[in-house]
Image (cartoon, rainbow, N blue to C red):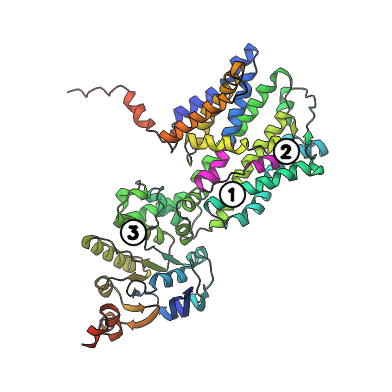
Amino acid sequence: MGRLALAVGAVAAILYPIPLQLQGTTYYQTVGFLVLINAMLGLGWNVIGGWAGQFDFGPQVFFGVGAYTAALLFVRLGLDAWLGLLAAVAVAVVVCAGLTYPLTRLRGHYFAIATVAIWMIAQPIGATWEFIGGSQGLFIPVKPRASVAASALSLQFSGPTKALGYYYSALALFALTLALMALVERSKLGYYFRAIRDDQEAAEGIGIDSRLYKVLARSITAAVFAAAGVLYAFWALSVFPEQVLELNWSTLPIMATVVGGIGRLWGPVLGAVILIPIAQIMSTTLGTGPLAGRGIDLIVYGLIIVLIAAFRPTGLLSLPWGRWFRRRRPAAPAPAP
Amino acid sequence: MAPLLSVEAVTKRFGGLLANRDISLVIEPGEIVGLIGPNGAGKTTLFNCITGSMHPDEGRIAFDGADITHARPERICGLGVARTWQVVRAFGRMTALDNVICGALERTNRVAEARARAAALLDFTELGARKDVPAANLTLADKKRLEIARALATRPRLLLLDEAMSGLTPRETAAAVQLVRRIHEELGVTICVVEHVMEVVMPLSHRVVVLDYGVKIADGRPQDVVRDELVISAYLGARRAAR
């Protein structure tokens, strides 16, 4: 992506909620928050699913691990959210590495099924383990904060600026994730992940420990999911199994990644920016009124995804944007004779 | 001097099929060894055992004194053995340059250093002009060259080429033979080539090992091996050998 496009995107993302805030609405800030959180999750999933080419349908487990870890530390020990976020990322990486290492013997569909199986096992554990609140979950009390700075430092926003505060927190975490993923893509890790995706035997033949690098790839995915889980928990002010272990925490980011362009750094970002607002608009327009309750919004939403998958299976970023963009520019003036 | 590679009494079975039966051979540093034999003789199986993608049922394989009989492929590569594949296994969605960078990263963690080395190796293998082409879009001859460049990027002391010349036109074959000679002379890499085409292996190899039905039937200088009765019967049938 060009520097100009990056700058325009950054400015747009920073300025986007300000006019809305001045109008006194908060709905669209929340939509923005959901776009950013799903873009961030997509960036994380792109590491294991896009670059390393291993279909992981259970990363929401680490979303849950992150949310629970930070919530427990906050509720029981009073540890602030950002410190809780660091701890949550560490716990998720350790749990992921331990769970994923045996899985790396499996390939293709079997790996995918195993990731789903782990998620299915996580659900009853979440619902019955009293230490983490069982099916009731944990409630995160809002402590009154004296200033905006104190709110930002503790990731606790309330009142009319709540949506705005979480929007900018999500933007910061998203930007950090994007920068880190850009580094990963250009590092040895990025090359090795893609080598394993393209041909595991050949990769091992040139010295790549495929099992180690698959574990590393999924651990990066898990770290991003855990961080997003913490952010979500403090926004929702609660953590309970059906909420943080919901399937949508993997399907939406995966769809965003595939629609935008799997295996491309900006793919999940573009996908989330397109799909999440559409989903929100669909559910508020088609999901209410006389047609409510019939799932029309989901049908139309599904249709959009099917159309993109049918006509551009490699994702929207793979369209020849560069060529179209250049064609629209005026031709260079003929050189003077 | 101690042999670079020693294969001692290696046997590999697939169910009831004996793909390699009691095979022993050595490769000395600086040699070009041709490993030949009719289709199904067990050449690729032996390669797979040496490079760790399979493990022998019996016997022992050592590289530079280290036992690699049951080592993983990535460790064997780290010790200095690189290979190419009979059916090309380039990283199809990556560019030619990125393919070779992946190989070069075996010896460094710095991508910039790996990139410089990869570019030099693409020039060495005459693929420099195609460095930004996705590997899947290269011709067969170029894919085979790319695999050689990627293997060389891991800085091997022993390079195993599995039918690097089969399926190529006569001109491409000649160029590939030339490349193998240059790898031997300019980079000082010991080479073992698997081929079933005698015309390619004979002038290239210092020594030829012949397999037939999983058994080693000859091991010697090319000019001696072509006169060996067992070898002639393996290639042309028993009646001709009797003449």
Horizontal and vertical percent for residue A103? Answer: 60, 54
**Of A13 and B16, which appears nearest the observer?**
B16
Seen in the picture, residue A114 relative to A1 is either above or below; the reply is: below
Label 2 close to label 1 by CB (< 8 Å) = no
> Is the C terminus of chain B in the top left, top right, bottom left or bottom right quadrant?
bottom left
Task: Tell us which disc is closer to us: 3 or 1.
Answer: 1
How many labels, in total? 3
Horizontal and vertical percent for residue A107? Answer: 53, 54
On the rendered structure, is A310 left or right of B130?
A: right
Parent chain of label 1? A
Horizontal and vertical percent for residue B59? Answer: 50, 79
On the rendered structure, is B237 left or right of B115?
A: left
The residues tagged by marks 2 and 3 sit, at their Cα atoms, a distance apart of: 52 Å
The residues tagged by marks 3 and 1 sit, at their Cα atoms, a distance apart of: 35 Å
Q: Residue at x 61, y 28 (%)?
A: A34
Task: Tell us which disc is closer to us: 2 or 1.
Answer: 1
The dominant secondary structure in magenta is helix
- Residue A155 seen in this snapshot: no
> Is the N terminus of chain B in the top left, top right, bottom left or bottom right quadrant?
bottom left
Seen in the picture, residue A81 relative to A130 is either above or below; the reply is: above
- Residue B15 seen in this snapshot: yes
User: Label 2: which residue?
Assistant: A241
User: Label 1: which residue?
Assistant: A113
Q: Residue at x 30, y 74 (%)?
A: B205
User: Label 3: which residue?
Assistant: B144
A96 in the magenta segment = no
Q: Which residues are magenta?
A: A41-66
Mark 2 is surrounded, within 10 Å at the Cα level, by few (under 14), some (14 to 19) or many (20 or more) other residues, namely many
**Which kind of residue does numbered mark 3 sit on?**
Lys
